[in-house]
Structure formats: structure tokens, C-alpha cells
Amino acid sequence: MKFLIVWLVVLFVPFFSKASSSCSEIPAIDLGKIRNQGDKGWCFAHAAADLIGYAFKDELRGQQVSATHLALKYARKYSPWSPYQDGGFIRLAIRRGTQDGVCLADMDDRLMNGGPSSDLSAKLDYLDELWSAQNKNDWKRYDELLRTAISKGSILSTIPQATLLQTLRQASRAQAASRVADLLCRHNGQFQVLHRKINKTSYVTKATIGGNGTLFHIIDGELSFRNPVGIDFYSAFLMEDTLKKDGRHAATLIGRRTNPKTGECEYLLRNSWGESCGLRGFFCNEGRFDKGNIWVPKALLQKFIYAMTIIEKK
């Protein structure tokens, strides 16, 4: 019903008022601690985890959803030939999480804070090597890998070794990381089945609705209803002064304002690159960057956004 109202606004407001061209403030929606995808291109999973966490915030008691768990489940379903593949679709990650249950983000913190490496890719490579050792019956190497991980405080130390070995034996190489993530999540009490059914996930592209004007009417309507919007866009402009449509990326829009200095309409983009800036100077200065959130001029977003995803509110 609410999405129908937004569409009616999209269709009729431009004809009867000037509200569609306004840029009144929409305070930022709080989605919790800023995310950091590290060296993995799992931005889509971080955006999906934020949308799920917000839509089910009462059921999850305000706890964040694990993006790593979502990404691995996504790969097991949609790209089993490449389980650590970068890139994906927000809407499909949402589907996996809301159908099968989610893991809480505490698992991500424990995963990253212990073990033989601080890089997520290296941790996944380690699990792959552990799987290979047991598959080859190379028990000397297997024990060596496991002892090293446990000595460095890996979350694997929380699982009975017999249970871990059984999980690896029952998994294919492509499934190993996802199966172990499920095991870690459940064994550490982080797994959460979502009992309430999701209303609907809407995926809208610029091409299907006739351009950016309508797309931004929908975005404005959702933000006005206090509903975050996942977006797919070309992100090269965040790193360098360019208008090239390079670097596919996903993030979440959570607010809107008129820049007090420039008068530009800007949207608050919640990124997944951590709290340090690491962007080109334009975004690190002039009050545009705040601990991982970036104020991006609407004019730039209009050039580079090509799709949006929302979980409809009741």
C-alpha cells in the first residue's frame, strides 16, 4: 500500500506542486556501526545486510546483520563455481537472507579480530587450504593449519574439532566457507530465523521507469517514509575527478540535505569502506565525509546511479 502511495506521488506531484524539486532535509536513518568490506567486493551484501537489519530491527532487537554470511550464502546459491567471487545483486542477497535466516554481525567482528591474518581474502584462502588438506588426507598439514589458527585466537577455536572436520568432509570445495560460516553462526548463538515474512523487495532500474527524474522521486518518497534505499552506481567519481562510468558499486542512501555552503541538494550515502576517508579530496573536505557516510551532490548521483532496491515497509 505504501509503495502505491509513493508511485501516486511520482505520477501526480510534479503536475500539481513544486514539492518534487525541493530539497528539504531528511534526517539520516541510523543503521548502526559503519561497515567495512575490506579487500572483498561484497558491497552488495553490506547494503543488503543494512536493508534487512533495518526492516527487521524489532525482531533483531536492533542488532546488525552479518554481510560476510550473506555473501557466502549468496555465492553458494548463485555462483557456486566461484564461491569468493566479488560483486552481486542486493535484491538476491536479501532473498537468501530473509528465506533462510541471517547471522548477526558480531560474527563478522570475531572473524576479523582473530586468526592467522587480518584480511578477509586471506582468511577465506586459509579455509580453502584447510579443506584441501582434509580432502587429500594430509593430516599433518591439517593439524598444523588448525593449531596455527587456534593459537592466534581464531573463531574456529569455538567449534569442537570433530564437528569442524565433519562439516569440511561433507562440503564440496566451493561450499566449504559457506558451510563453516553457517556452523560458526549457529554454534556461537548468532543465527536468527526471521519469522515475519518480508512484504516485498522492489528492484527498479533507471531504464525501466524512464530516467532519473522518476527514480529520484521514488528515492525521495522512500527516504521521506524513513526507509533506506540500496543503490547500484558507478563509483569511480568517488576516487578520482572523472565522469567515466567505471567501478560498479553498491551502497545505501539514508538522508538528504541542502548543502549550507553550496546550496546543492545532496544525499547521504552510507558506504562500506570503513571510517577512514580514502576518497578524492572533494569528498574528504568541506564537511562531506563523516565516519564512512558521504554527502554526494544529487547532480553527481543522477549521472552514475542505475538501479535501486528497497524492502517495502508495512
Image (tube, rainbow, N blue to C red):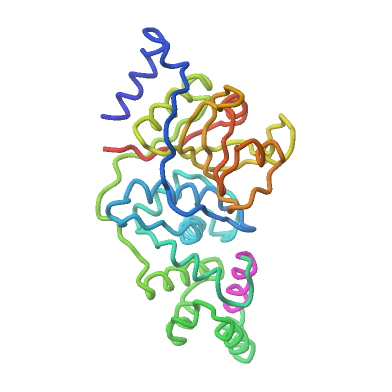
Q: Is residue 114 magenta?
A: no
- Residue drawn at (53%, 22%) of the image: 212
Residue lying at the far bottom in this picture: please name it. Answer: 140
- Residue drawn at (46%, 35%) of the image: 255
Q: In the displayed structure, does residue 243 sit left or right of residue 187?
A: right
Query: 77 or 118: nearer the eye?
Result: 118
- The quadrant of the image that shows the C terminus is top left
- The quadrant of the image that shows the N terminus is top left
Work out whether 14 lies above or below 127. above
Q: In the displayed structure, does residue 195 sit left or right of residue 48?
A: left
Query: 97 or 103: nearer the eye?
Result: 103
Report x, y in % for residue 98: 35, 52
Report x, y in % for residue 90: 48, 45
Q: Is residue 126 magenta?
A: yes
Q: Which residues are magenta?
A: 120-131
- Residue drawn at (42%, 83%) of the image: 163
